[in-house]
Image (cartoon, rainbow, N blue to C red):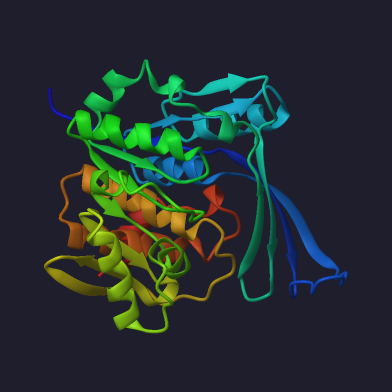
Amino acid sequence: MNKEGVLVVGSANMDLVVFTNSFPKPGETVFGNDFQMFPGGKGANQAVACSKLGGKTYFMGKMGNDDFANSLYDSLHSNNIDLSYLMKSKESHTGMALITVDGKGENEIVVVSGTNMKLTCEDLKNSNVLFKDVKIVLTQLEIPTETVMSIANLASENNTLFILNPAPAKELPDSLFPLIDYLTPNETELEILSGVKIKNENDIKTAAYVLLDKGVKNVIVTLAEKGSILINKNRFDLFIGNAVVAIDTTGAGDTFNGALAYSLSKNKTIEESINFANYSASISVTRRGAQSSMPTKQEVKQIIQ
Protein backbone atom coordinates (compact mmCIF):
# COMPACT_ATOMS: atom_id res chain seq x y z
CA MET A 1 0.00 0.00 0.00
CA ASN A 2 1.26 3.49 -0.86
CA LYS A 3 1.96 5.75 2.08
CA GLU A 4 -0.16 8.89 2.14
CA GLY A 5 -0.61 11.97 4.29
CA VAL A 6 0.93 13.55 7.36
CA LEU A 7 0.63 12.55 11.01
CA VAL A 8 1.21 15.42 13.42
CA VAL A 9 1.75 14.37 17.03
CA GLY A 10 1.90 17.14 19.59
CA SER A 11 0.29 19.90 21.56
CA ALA A 12 -3.01 21.72 21.39
CA ASN A 13 -3.40 24.97 23.33
CA MET A 14 -5.87 27.78 23.61
CA ASP A 15 -3.97 30.99 22.81
CA LEU A 16 -4.98 33.99 24.92
CA VAL A 17 -3.56 36.92 22.98
CA VAL A 18 -3.08 40.54 24.03
CA PHE A 19 -2.08 43.17 21.46
CA THR A 20 -0.13 46.15 22.78
CA ASN A 21 2.21 48.84 21.45
CA SER A 22 5.26 47.61 23.38
CA PHE A 23 6.18 44.79 25.76
CA PRO A 24 6.11 45.75 29.45
CA LYS A 25 9.44 45.92 31.28
CA PRO A 26 9.68 43.93 34.55
CA GLY A 27 7.35 45.59 37.06
CA GLU A 28 5.75 47.82 34.41
CA THR A 29 2.06 47.90 33.48
CA VAL A 30 1.09 48.79 29.92
CA PHE A 31 -2.30 49.09 28.28
CA GLY A 32 -3.36 46.57 25.68
CA ASN A 33 -5.18 47.53 22.50
CA ASP A 34 -7.12 44.31 22.00
CA PHE A 35 -7.65 40.78 23.36
CA GLN A 36 -8.58 37.68 21.40
CA MET A 37 -8.67 33.92 21.89
CA PHE A 38 -7.27 31.70 19.14
CA PRO A 39 -6.93 27.90 18.86
CA GLY A 40 -3.21 27.10 19.01
CA GLY A 41 -0.46 24.81 20.24
CA LYS A 42 2.43 23.89 17.97
CA GLY A 43 1.07 20.45 17.14
CA ALA A 44 -2.46 21.58 16.36
CA ASN A 45 -1.13 24.60 14.45
CA GLN A 46 1.08 22.46 12.25
CA ALA A 47 -1.78 20.05 11.57
CA VAL A 48 -4.05 22.93 10.52
CA ALA A 49 -1.32 24.41 8.30
CA CYS A 50 -0.91 21.09 6.53
CA SER A 51 -4.63 20.43 6.17
CA LYS A 52 -5.49 23.94 4.93
CA LEU A 53 -2.97 23.43 2.13
CA GLY A 54 -4.88 20.35 1.08
CA GLY A 55 -2.94 17.58 2.80
CA LYS A 56 -4.52 14.45 4.29
CA THR A 57 -3.73 15.15 7.93
CA TYR A 58 -4.03 13.22 11.20
CA PHE A 59 -3.58 14.81 14.62
CA MET A 60 -2.64 12.87 17.73
CA GLY A 61 -2.58 14.64 21.08
CA LYS A 62 -4.23 14.87 24.48
CA MET A 63 -6.66 17.49 25.82
CA GLY A 64 -8.47 18.04 29.09
CA ASN A 65 -12.18 17.62 29.72
CA ASP A 66 -13.05 21.34 29.57
CA ASP A 67 -14.40 24.15 27.41
CA PHE A 68 -11.02 24.89 25.84
CA ALA A 69 -10.85 21.27 24.64
CA ASN A 70 -14.27 21.54 23.03
CA SER A 71 -13.28 24.71 21.17
CA LEU A 72 -9.98 23.21 20.02
CA TYR A 73 -11.68 20.03 18.84
CA ASP A 74 -14.22 22.04 16.84
CA SER A 75 -11.46 24.07 15.21
CA LEU A 76 -9.44 21.01 14.20
CA HIS A 77 -12.54 19.18 12.96
CA SER A 78 -13.63 22.18 10.90
CA ASN A 79 -10.23 22.10 9.19
CA ASN A 80 -10.83 18.53 7.97
CA ILE A 81 -8.25 16.93 10.26
CA ASP A 82 -8.69 13.27 11.21
CA LEU A 83 -9.06 13.22 15.02
CA SER A 84 -9.47 9.47 15.48
CA TYR A 85 -6.32 9.39 17.62
CA LEU A 86 -7.08 12.48 19.74
CA MET A 87 -7.35 11.68 23.46
CA LYS A 88 -9.08 13.40 26.38
CA SER A 89 -8.02 13.15 30.00
CA LYS A 90 -9.20 14.30 33.42
CA GLU A 91 -5.61 14.38 34.69
CA SER A 92 -5.17 18.07 33.94
CA HIS A 93 -6.57 21.06 32.07
CA THR A 94 -6.16 21.61 28.36
CA GLY A 95 -2.97 23.47 27.48
CA MET A 96 -2.98 27.22 27.10
CA ALA A 97 -0.59 29.94 25.96
CA LEU A 98 -0.46 33.53 27.17
CA ILE A 99 0.76 35.63 24.24
CA THR A 100 1.65 39.31 24.00
CA VAL A 101 2.04 40.83 20.52
CA ASP A 102 3.70 44.24 20.20
CA GLY A 103 3.29 46.98 17.60
CA LYS A 104 5.98 45.44 15.37
CA GLY A 105 4.24 42.07 15.23
CA GLU A 106 6.79 40.39 17.50
CA ASN A 107 5.54 38.13 20.29
CA GLU A 108 6.35 36.90 23.78
CA ILE A 109 4.75 33.62 24.86
CA VAL A 110 4.22 31.76 28.14
CA VAL A 111 2.90 28.20 27.70
CA VAL A 112 1.03 26.29 30.43
CA SER A 113 1.25 22.73 29.14
CA GLY A 114 -1.58 20.96 30.96
CA THR A 115 -2.53 17.67 29.29
CA ASN A 116 0.05 18.09 26.52
CA MET A 117 2.67 16.88 28.98
CA LYS A 118 0.46 13.90 29.82
CA LEU A 119 0.81 12.39 26.33
CA THR A 120 2.80 9.24 27.11
CA CYS A 121 4.62 6.46 25.28
CA GLU A 122 1.79 4.18 26.41
CA ASP A 123 -0.68 6.36 24.50
CA LEU A 124 1.16 5.56 21.27
CA LYS A 125 0.89 1.78 21.60
CA ASN A 126 -2.21 1.34 19.48
CA SER A 127 -1.10 3.67 16.68
CA ASN A 128 1.43 1.51 14.83
CA VAL A 129 -0.90 1.11 11.84
CA LEU A 130 -1.13 4.88 11.46
CA PHE A 131 2.66 5.28 11.57
CA LYS A 132 2.89 2.58 8.91
CA ASP A 133 0.35 4.19 6.57
CA VAL A 134 1.37 7.86 6.61
CA LYS A 135 4.21 9.34 4.56
CA ILE A 136 5.40 11.97 7.06
CA VAL A 137 5.46 12.16 10.85
CA LEU A 138 5.91 15.63 12.34
CA THR A 139 6.29 16.50 16.01
CA GLN A 140 7.59 19.21 18.35
CA LEU A 141 8.79 19.59 21.94
CA GLU A 142 5.61 20.69 23.76
CA ILE A 143 5.12 17.04 24.75
CA PRO A 144 7.41 14.85 26.92
CA THR A 145 10.86 14.05 25.52
CA GLU A 146 10.31 10.32 26.13
CA THR A 147 7.19 10.49 23.97
CA VAL A 148 9.11 12.28 21.20
CA MET A 149 11.67 9.47 21.37
CA SER A 150 8.92 6.87 20.97
CA ILE A 151 7.44 8.79 18.03
CA ALA A 152 10.83 8.87 16.33
CA ASN A 153 11.34 5.14 16.87
CA LEU A 154 7.88 4.31 15.51
CA ALA A 155 8.56 6.43 12.41
CA SER A 156 11.91 4.71 11.90
CA GLU A 157 10.46 1.21 12.37
CA ASN A 158 7.82 1.96 9.75
CA ASN A 159 10.17 3.64 7.24
CA THR A 160 8.27 6.90 7.61
CA LEU A 161 9.99 10.28 7.14
CA PHE A 162 10.40 11.99 10.52
CA ILE A 163 10.49 15.78 10.97
CA LEU A 164 11.26 17.26 14.38
CA ASN A 165 10.56 20.93 15.01
CA PRO A 166 12.65 21.41 18.18
CA ALA A 167 10.45 24.05 19.75
CA PRO A 168 10.63 25.07 22.45
CA ALA A 169 14.26 23.94 22.43
CA LYS A 170 15.60 21.83 25.28
CA GLU A 171 18.32 19.25 25.84
CA LEU A 172 17.65 16.07 23.86
CA PRO A 173 19.09 12.56 24.20
CA ASP A 174 21.86 11.76 21.71
CA SER A 175 19.99 8.60 20.71
CA LEU A 176 17.23 10.76 19.17
CA PHE A 177 19.37 12.60 16.60
CA PRO A 178 20.09 9.67 14.21
CA LEU A 179 16.32 9.11 13.89
CA ILE A 180 15.67 12.65 12.58
CA ASP A 181 15.36 13.11 8.81
CA TYR A 182 14.71 16.87 9.03
CA LEU A 183 15.39 19.05 12.08
CA THR A 184 13.83 22.53 11.76
CA PRO A 185 15.16 24.94 14.43
CA ASN A 186 15.16 28.71 14.32
CA GLU A 187 18.44 30.45 15.22
CA THR A 188 17.68 30.57 18.96
CA GLU A 189 16.75 26.89 19.05
CA LEU A 190 19.85 26.01 17.04
CA GLU A 191 22.02 27.80 19.63
CA ILE A 192 20.40 25.89 22.48
CA LEU A 193 20.69 22.50 20.80
CA SER A 194 24.27 22.96 19.58
CA GLY A 195 25.80 25.13 22.29
CA VAL A 196 27.22 27.40 19.57
CA LYS A 197 26.62 31.16 19.83
CA ILE A 198 25.25 32.36 16.50
CA LYS A 199 26.17 35.74 15.06
CA ASN A 200 26.52 34.98 11.34
CA GLU A 201 26.11 32.30 8.66
CA ASN A 202 29.42 30.64 9.53
CA ASP A 203 28.17 30.16 13.08
CA ILE A 204 24.95 28.64 11.71
CA LYS A 205 27.01 26.16 9.71
CA THR A 206 29.19 25.30 12.71
CA ALA A 207 26.14 24.81 14.93
CA ALA A 208 24.34 22.69 12.34
CA TYR A 209 27.38 20.45 11.98
CA VAL A 210 27.29 19.73 15.71
CA LEU A 211 23.86 18.20 15.10
CA LEU A 212 24.78 16.54 11.81
CA ASP A 213 27.73 14.89 13.55
CA LYS A 214 25.26 13.49 16.11
CA GLY A 215 23.36 11.79 13.31
CA VAL A 216 20.73 14.26 12.07
CA LYS A 217 20.36 13.83 8.29
CA ASN A 218 19.28 17.38 7.41
CA VAL A 219 19.02 20.66 9.34
CA ILE A 220 16.71 23.40 8.06
CA VAL A 221 17.28 26.65 9.96
CA THR A 222 14.42 29.14 9.73
CA LEU A 223 15.50 32.80 9.61
CA ALA A 224 12.15 34.64 9.73
CA GLU A 225 11.94 37.20 6.90
CA LYS A 226 15.38 36.22 5.59
CA GLY A 227 14.14 32.75 4.60
CA SER A 228 15.78 29.49 5.63
CA ILE A 229 18.98 27.49 5.21
CA LEU A 230 19.28 23.79 4.34
CA ILE A 231 22.41 22.16 5.74
CA ASN A 232 23.58 18.58 5.41
CA LYS A 233 26.97 16.95 4.89
CA ASN A 234 26.88 17.89 1.18
CA ARG A 235 25.33 21.35 1.03
CA PHE A 236 24.69 24.71 2.67
CA ASP A 237 21.97 26.53 0.72
CA LEU A 238 20.04 29.70 1.55
CA PHE A 239 16.42 29.90 0.38
CA ILE A 240 15.39 33.56 0.26
CA GLY A 241 12.16 34.47 2.04
CA ASN A 242 9.27 36.53 0.72
CA ALA A 243 9.45 40.10 2.08
CA VAL A 244 6.16 41.25 3.68
CA VAL A 245 5.00 43.65 6.40
CA ALA A 246 4.45 41.49 9.48
CA ILE A 247 1.39 42.09 11.66
CA ASP A 248 1.63 39.02 13.92
CA THR A 249 4.41 36.42 13.76
CA THR A 250 2.56 33.94 16.01
CA GLY A 251 2.39 30.59 14.24
CA ALA A 252 4.80 31.47 11.43
CA GLY A 253 7.16 28.64 12.35
CA ASP A 254 4.23 26.25 12.63
CA THR A 255 3.03 27.30 9.19
CA PHE A 256 6.52 26.64 7.81
CA ASN A 257 6.65 23.16 9.32
CA GLY A 258 3.14 22.18 8.28
CA ALA A 259 3.79 23.40 4.74
CA LEU A 260 7.13 21.59 4.59
CA ALA A 261 5.50 18.32 5.69
CA TYR A 262 2.64 18.80 3.23
CA SER A 263 4.94 19.46 0.29
CA LEU A 264 7.23 16.51 1.06
CA SER A 265 4.16 14.27 1.40
CA LYS A 266 3.27 15.23 -2.18
CA ASN A 267 6.66 13.98 -3.43
CA LYS A 268 8.07 17.46 -4.01
CA THR A 269 11.84 17.91 -3.80
CA ILE A 270 13.33 19.38 -0.64
CA GLU A 271 14.16 22.55 -2.60
CA GLU A 272 10.55 22.93 -3.76
CA SER A 273 9.28 22.12 -0.28
CA ILE A 274 11.42 24.70 1.52
CA ASN A 275 10.50 27.39 -0.98
CA PHE A 276 6.81 26.50 -0.60
CA ALA A 277 7.13 26.60 3.20
CA ASN A 278 8.88 30.00 3.12
CA TYR A 279 6.07 31.53 1.08
CA SER A 280 3.37 29.90 3.21
CA ALA A 281 4.91 31.36 6.39
CA SER A 282 5.21 34.80 4.78
CA ILE A 283 1.45 34.90 4.23
CA SER A 284 0.72 33.86 7.81
CA VAL A 285 2.55 36.82 9.39
CA THR A 286 0.34 39.30 7.52
CA ARG A 287 -2.70 38.15 9.53
CA ARG A 288 -3.57 37.87 13.22
CA GLY A 289 -3.57 34.59 15.08
CA ALA A 290 -1.94 31.26 14.39
CA GLN A 291 -4.40 28.84 12.78
CA SER A 292 -6.60 31.68 11.51
CA SER A 293 -3.65 33.19 9.63
CA MET A 294 -2.58 30.07 7.74
CA PRO A 295 -2.96 30.10 3.94
CA THR A 296 -4.58 27.76 1.45
CA LYS A 297 -2.58 26.19 -1.38
CA GLN A 298 -4.21 28.57 -3.87
CA GLU A 299 -3.05 31.60 -1.88
CA VAL A 300 0.52 30.32 -1.83
CA LYS A 301 0.49 29.51 -5.53
CA GLN A 302 -0.57 33.08 -6.32
CA ILE A 303 2.64 34.55 -4.87
CA ILE A 304 5.25 31.78 -5.13
CA GLN A 305 8.21 32.23 -7.45
Residue 163: percent from left, percent from top: 31, 47
Q: Is residue 33 left or right of residue 131?
A: right
Q: Is residue 107 left or right of residue 47?
A: right
Numbered marks: total? 0
Viewer-closest of 45 and 151: 151
Residue 284: percent from left, percent from top: 48, 60
Residue 194 in sight here: yes
Asked if 167 appears above or below 73 in the picture, the reply is: below
> What residue appears at the point 43 percent right and 75 percent down from the top-left corner?
225
Image quadrant where one finds the N terminus: top left
Residue 255: percent from left, percent from top: 43, 54
Viewer-closest of 123 and 240: 123
Viewer-closest of 73 and 214: 214
> What residue appears at the point 64 percent right and 29 percent down from the top-left corner?
69
Asked if 199 appears above or below 102 in the picture, the reply is: below
Quadrant for residue 160, please give it.
top left
Viewer-closest of 6 and 10: 10
Image quadrant where one finds the C terminus: bottom left
Q: Is residue 220 left or right of residue 117?
A: left
Residue at the farthest top position: 126
Residue 103: percent from left, percent from top: 68, 74
Residue 240 in sight here: no
Asked if 114 appears above or below 271 in the picture, the reply is: above
> What residue appears at the point 43 percent right and 25 percent down from the top-left corner?
121
